[in-house]
Amino acid sequence: MEIWWQDEARIGQKNGLVRQWARRGTRPRQPADQRYKSAYLFGAICPARGKGAALALPYVDTEAMQLHIDEISRHVADGAHAVLLLDRAGWHTTANLDIPDNITPIFLPSRAPELNPVENIWQYLRSNWLSNRVFDTYEVIIDAACDAWLKLLDSPQVITSIGMRQCAYVDQSS
Protein backbone atom coordinates (compact mmCIF):
# COMPACT_ATOMS: atom_id res chain seq x y z
CA MET A 1 0.00 0.00 0.00
CA GLU A 2 1.17 3.50 -0.83
CA ILE A 3 0.12 6.72 0.87
CA TRP A 4 -0.26 9.72 -1.44
CA TRP A 5 -1.11 13.29 -0.45
CA GLN A 6 -2.78 15.69 -2.92
CA ASP A 7 -3.49 19.42 -3.17
CA GLU A 8 -3.60 22.33 -5.63
CA ALA A 9 -1.72 25.64 -5.61
CA ARG A 10 -2.39 28.82 -7.55
CA ILE A 11 0.71 30.18 -9.23
CA GLY A 12 0.62 33.43 -11.10
CA GLN A 13 1.10 37.09 -11.55
CA LYS A 14 -0.54 38.26 -8.34
CA ASN A 15 2.28 36.68 -6.39
CA GLY A 16 2.96 36.97 -2.70
CA LEU A 17 6.19 38.29 -1.34
CA VAL A 18 8.34 36.12 0.88
CA ARG A 19 10.94 36.95 3.46
CA GLN A 20 14.48 37.35 2.28
CA TRP A 21 17.80 38.00 3.97
CA ALA A 22 19.23 41.49 3.71
CA ARG A 23 21.99 43.45 5.36
CA ARG A 24 20.76 45.35 8.44
CA GLY A 25 19.66 48.84 7.54
CA THR A 26 18.92 48.02 3.89
CA ARG A 27 15.59 47.53 2.19
CA PRO A 28 15.84 44.89 -0.54
CA ARG A 29 13.75 45.34 -3.65
CA GLN A 30 11.16 42.70 -4.39
CA PRO A 31 9.16 42.67 -7.61
CA ALA A 32 5.39 42.90 -7.29
CA ASP A 33 2.90 42.25 -10.04
CA GLN A 34 -0.68 43.51 -9.93
CA ARG A 35 -1.94 41.48 -12.91
CA TYR A 36 -4.16 38.45 -12.39
CA LYS A 37 -3.18 35.66 -14.81
CA SER A 38 -2.60 32.40 -13.01
CA ALA A 39 -2.45 28.64 -13.37
CA TYR A 40 -3.06 25.85 -10.92
CA LEU A 41 -0.51 23.20 -10.08
CA PHE A 42 -2.27 19.98 -9.07
CA GLY A 43 0.33 18.02 -7.14
CA ALA A 44 0.53 14.77 -5.23
CA ILE A 45 3.41 13.15 -3.39
CA CYS A 46 4.19 9.69 -2.09
CA PRO A 47 6.76 10.47 0.62
CA ALA A 48 7.71 6.84 1.27
CA ARG A 49 8.81 6.45 -2.36
CA GLY A 50 10.01 10.04 -2.86
CA LYS A 51 7.73 10.29 -5.91
CA GLY A 52 5.26 12.83 -7.18
CA ALA A 53 2.68 13.41 -9.88
CA ALA A 54 1.47 16.81 -11.07
CA LEU A 55 -0.39 18.67 -13.77
CA ALA A 56 -0.36 22.42 -14.45
CA LEU A 57 -3.86 23.43 -15.51
CA PRO A 58 -5.69 26.70 -16.18
CA TYR A 59 -8.58 26.03 -13.79
CA VAL A 60 -9.78 23.93 -10.86
CA ASP A 61 -12.92 21.88 -11.33
CA THR A 62 -14.10 18.28 -11.50
CA GLU A 63 -12.68 17.73 -14.99
CA ALA A 64 -9.25 18.99 -13.93
CA MET A 65 -9.37 16.83 -10.80
CA GLN A 66 -10.23 13.78 -12.89
CA LEU A 67 -7.18 14.40 -15.06
CA HIS A 68 -5.03 14.64 -11.94
CA ILE A 69 -6.42 11.47 -10.34
CA ASP A 70 -5.71 9.62 -13.59
CA GLU A 71 -2.15 11.01 -13.54
CA ILE A 72 -1.63 9.87 -9.93
CA SER A 73 -2.97 6.42 -10.84
CA ARG A 74 -0.29 6.10 -13.53
CA HIS A 75 2.42 6.80 -10.91
CA VAL A 76 1.26 4.23 -8.36
CA ALA A 77 3.71 1.32 -8.36
CA ASP A 78 2.68 -1.72 -10.40
CA GLY A 79 0.57 -4.07 -8.30
CA ALA A 80 0.25 -1.53 -5.47
CA HIS A 81 -2.84 0.18 -4.12
CA ALA A 82 -2.74 3.86 -3.12
CA VAL A 83 -4.58 5.67 -0.38
CA LEU A 84 -5.01 9.25 -1.61
CA LEU A 85 -5.49 11.84 1.13
CA LEU A 86 -7.37 14.95 -0.01
CA ASP A 87 -8.96 18.02 1.49
CA ARG A 88 -12.68 18.56 1.07
CA ALA A 89 -12.72 20.89 -1.92
CA GLY A 90 -15.89 20.50 -3.95
CA TRP A 91 -14.05 19.06 -6.94
CA HIS A 92 -12.54 16.38 -4.65
CA THR A 93 -15.77 15.23 -3.04
CA THR A 94 -18.08 15.16 -6.07
CA ALA A 95 -19.66 11.87 -7.07
CA ASN A 96 -18.80 12.74 -10.70
CA LEU A 97 -15.19 11.57 -10.28
CA ASP A 98 -14.27 8.15 -11.67
CA ILE A 99 -11.76 6.83 -9.13
CA PRO A 100 -9.33 4.25 -10.61
CA ASP A 101 -9.26 0.80 -9.05
CA ASN A 102 -5.74 1.31 -7.66
CA ILE A 103 -6.74 4.39 -5.58
CA THR A 104 -8.91 4.79 -2.48
CA PRO A 105 -9.62 8.42 -1.52
CA ILE A 106 -9.65 9.46 2.14
CA PHE A 107 -10.75 12.96 3.06
CA LEU A 108 -8.98 15.08 5.64
CA PRO A 109 -11.02 17.10 8.14
CA SER A 110 -12.42 20.41 6.89
CA ARG A 111 -10.35 23.55 7.40
CA ALA A 112 -7.21 21.68 8.46
CA PRO A 113 -4.53 22.42 5.85
CA GLU A 114 -1.81 21.82 8.43
CA LEU A 115 -2.55 18.09 8.15
CA ASN A 116 -1.53 17.97 4.49
CA PRO A 117 2.24 17.98 3.85
CA VAL A 118 1.67 19.11 0.25
CA GLU A 119 0.97 22.55 1.74
CA ASN A 120 4.63 22.50 2.80
CA ILE A 121 5.63 21.38 -0.70
CA TRP A 122 3.99 24.56 -2.07
CA GLN A 123 5.88 26.62 0.48
CA TYR A 124 9.13 24.93 -0.55
CA LEU A 125 8.49 25.52 -4.27
CA ARG A 126 7.61 29.16 -3.68
CA SER A 127 10.57 29.89 -1.44
CA ASN A 128 13.04 28.19 -3.78
CA TRP A 129 11.82 28.79 -7.32
CA LEU A 130 8.54 30.68 -7.62
CA SER A 131 8.63 33.72 -5.34
CA ASN A 132 9.76 37.28 -6.02
CA ARG A 133 9.23 36.89 -9.75
CA VAL A 134 7.18 38.66 -12.37
CA PHE A 135 5.60 36.36 -14.93
CA ASP A 136 4.99 38.14 -18.24
CA THR A 137 2.60 35.62 -19.81
CA TYR A 138 0.48 32.62 -18.97
CA GLU A 139 2.97 30.39 -20.79
CA VAL A 140 5.78 31.65 -18.54
CA ILE A 141 3.65 30.82 -15.48
CA ILE A 142 3.11 27.25 -16.76
CA ASP A 143 6.81 26.86 -17.58
CA ALA A 144 7.83 28.10 -14.11
CA ALA A 145 5.36 25.78 -12.34
CA CYS A 146 6.50 22.77 -14.36
CA ASP A 147 10.17 23.64 -13.92
CA ALA A 148 9.76 23.96 -10.14
CA TRP A 149 7.93 20.62 -9.95
CA LEU A 150 10.57 18.86 -12.05
CA LYS A 151 13.31 20.25 -9.79
CA LEU A 152 11.40 18.86 -6.81
CA LEU A 153 11.15 15.44 -8.46
CA ASP A 154 14.92 15.50 -8.98
CA SER A 155 15.26 15.56 -5.17
CA PRO A 156 13.28 12.58 -3.85
CA GLN A 157 14.91 13.06 -0.44
CA VAL A 158 13.21 16.48 -0.21
CA ILE A 159 9.82 14.94 -0.97
CA THR A 160 10.43 12.32 1.71
CA SER A 161 11.72 14.84 4.23
CA ILE A 162 8.80 17.24 3.79
CA GLY A 163 6.16 14.54 3.40
CA MET A 164 7.01 12.15 6.22
CA ARG A 165 5.02 13.78 8.99
CA GLN A 166 5.37 12.11 12.37
CA CYS A 167 1.67 12.62 13.14
CA ALA A 168 0.62 11.02 9.85
CA TYR A 169 2.81 7.95 10.13
CA VAL A 170 2.53 6.91 13.77
CA ASP A 171 2.40 3.11 13.93
CA GLN A 172 2.35 2.86 10.12
CA SER A 173 4.74 0.83 8.03
CA SER A 174 5.44 1.92 4.47
Image (cartoon, helix red, strand yellow):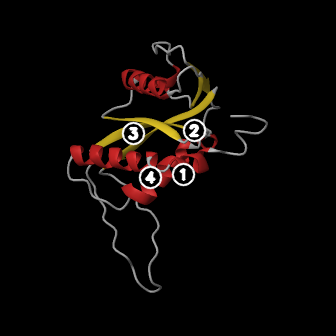
Among numbered discs 2 and 1, the one appearing first in the sequence: 2
Say which residue label 4 marks. Answer: 125
The one of 121 and 108 positioned closer to us in this rendering:
121
Residue drawn 54% across the image and 46% down it: 159
Q: Tell me the element at label 2.
A: loop
Observer-side mark, 1 or 4, equals 1
Q: Distance between the residues labelled 2 and 3?
A: 21 Å
What amino acid does circle 1 point to? Val
Q: Tell me the element at label 4.
A: helix
Q: Distance between the residues labelled 4 and 2?
A: 19 Å
Say which residue label 1 marks. Answer: 158
Q: Please, is residue 95 above or below residue 91 in the view?
A: above
Give the number of the disc on residue 41.
Answer: 3
Give yes or no for contact between labels 4 and 3 (Cβ–Cβ under 8 Å).
Answer: yes
Q: Position of residue 1 (x, y in %)?
A: 64, 25
Observer-side mark, 1 or 3, equals 1
Among numbered discs 1 and 3, the one appearing first in the sequence: 3
Q: In which quarter of the image is the C terminus?
A: top right
Among numbered discs 4 and 3, the one appearing first in the sequence: 3
Q: Position of residue 73 (x, y in %)?
A: 48, 23
Among numbered discs 1 and 4, the one appearing first in the sequence: 4
Q: Tell me the element at label 3.
A: strand
Q: Position of residue 9 (x, y in %)?
A: 43, 42
Among numbered discs 2 and 3, the one appearing first in the sequence: 3
